[in-house]
Amino acid sequence: MALQKLWIMAFRDLGRNRRRTLLTMVGVSLGLALIIMMSGLIAGMLDSTLQDTIRLQTGHLQLRSVSYEETKSSLLADDLLADSEDLLAQLQARPEVESATAVLWASGILHTNQESTGLKIVGIDPSADFHRHLADGLQAGEFLSTDDRRGILISKRLGDSMNVRVGDRISLAVGTGEGEPEEGIYTVRGLFTTGFPGYDDSTVFLPLETLQSLTRVGSRTSSIIVMLHNRDDSEALATAVQVPGVVALTWFDLNSLMLETLELAQVFYNFMYGIVILIVAVIIANTLLMAVFERIREMGILAALGMKGRQIMTMLLFESAILALVGIMLGVVLGSALVIYLSNVGIPIGDAAASSAGSFTIGTVMYTKFVPADIFQLSAWMLGIILLVSIYPAWYAARLEPVRALHSL
C-alpha cells in the first residue's frame, strides 16, 4: 500500500474522535509553548545579567596588579597600579578599545545621624564614558565633577532607606593604604538608580582623586576598566598587553562564577524541559493506545484484507506524526509570540527578588530573548521523543492477529 494512502487513512482516523485529537494537539502546543518561553527567559536572563554586569562593573577587560584580590578590596601599595596614566594612554590609542578608565575600590562604612551601613566605595573619573549610566540614572541632584572634593553620589534606594536627601552631609569611614582608620564628611550631590537593587544598595561613588586622598594611596588605582567595540577581541587584547606585575583579565575571567552558576541553572532547566516533553509524549502515546483498543476489530479487518503489520504500524506512526507536527507548529507560534512580547514588556519580579541575587546584577524586570536556534532544537527534540514513545502502540497494533482481533468485539 502506498504511503500516500496511509497518510490519508491516518488523517481520516484522527477525524473520528475530533475532541480527543484536538485536546492532544492542544496539549502538545501548550507544552512546547511553555518550554519555549522558559528557554527564552533563561536566555534573556543569561544575556542581560552578563551584559549589565559588564556595563556596570567589570567591563570587557581589566588590568590589575598581579597581587590584587578583589574580595579584599586591598589598598596596599603592592596590590595597586602605580602607573595607570601610562597604561590608560596606551589602551586608548588602540583601535579596538571603545573606552578605558581607572577606578579605585575600597570597603567602608557610611554613617548618618540615624544609622550606619557597610558598602563598597568606588572612586571614578566622572568624565569617563564607562560611568555614563550613573549620570543617565540620576533621580535628583547633579552628577559628580572631577574637581569636586566633598561630593558623593549614592543611590535613591540607599538614600530612602537611610533618610538621606540631596545636600545632606554623611560620613564615610575607611581603612587607608597605611592600615589606619580614616573618616571623611561628604555632601550628597545626587541620587541615582541603575534598576538593580542589589547594586544600588551596596555601592557609592566619589571622584577618584577624592577617594585616593581619603585612603592615602597617592595616585594609585585598583584597576583599569576597558570597554571594547567587540567583546570577542578581549582575549587578543589581554595577550597583547604585557606589563610586568600587571595581569589582564577578560570579561569571561571576571564573571566566571556567575557563568558557572548560570550554566548549572541551565542544566536544571534542561531537566525540566525533558520532563515536560516526556509528559507530552506520554499523552500522545496514550491517545494512540486508546485509539488502538477502540479499533481492534478494524485492525483485524485491515489485516484480513491483506494489510501488513508494518503498514499498520506505519499508519499509526503517521497519526502520531500528524498530532505532533500540528501541535508543534501551534506551539512554536504561541511560544514565539510570548517570547517576543515578553522581550519588550518583561516580567516584573520586584525589588525583593532582585535584591536577593546578591552580587549578580539582576534587575526588577526580567526580559526574554528570542533565539530561533533554541526553538528549532526544542521542537526537534519534542518531535523525536513523541515518535519514539509512539513506537510501542504502533508495534502493539501491528502484532494483532486478525482472527483474535475480529473476535474481540
Image (spheres, rainbow, N blue to C red):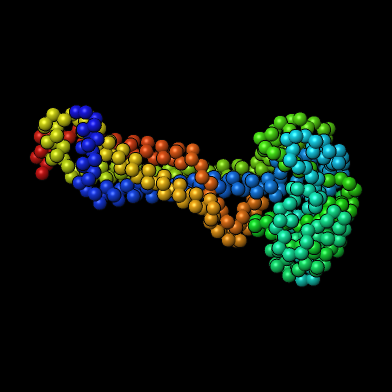
- Residue 94 percent across, percent down from the top left: 77, 34
Residue at x-position 75% and y-position 48%? 129
Query: Left or right: 150 with respect to 408?
Result: right
Task: Return the residue nearer the eye: 207 or 181.
Answer: 207
Count how many numbered circles sit on residues in the image.
0
User: Can residue 179 be seen?
Assistant: no
Residue at x-position 58% and y-position 56%? 365
- Residue 294 percent across, percent down from the top left: 18, 45
Please determine whether, in this image, residue 112 is positioned above or below residue 344. Answer: below
Residue at x-position 17% and y-position 35%? 400
Please determine whether, in this image, residue 162 is positioned above or below residue 118. Answer: below
- Residue 225 percent across, percent down from the top left: 76, 43
Task: Return the residue nearer the eye: 132 or 105.
Answer: 132
Query: Left or right: 347 with respect to 5?
Result: right
User: Can residue 209 be seen?
Assistant: yes
Residue at x-position 57% and y-position 48%? 45
Q: Quadrant of the C terminus?
A: top left
- Residue 12 percent across, percent down from the top left: 21, 41
Q: Residue 264 appears in which quarter of the rendering? A: top right
Query: Left or right: 235 with respect to 209?
Result: left
Q: Quadrant of the N terminus?
A: top left
Please determine whether, in this image, residue 330 is positioned above or below residue 345. Answer: above
Query: Left or right: 373 with respect to 262?
Result: left
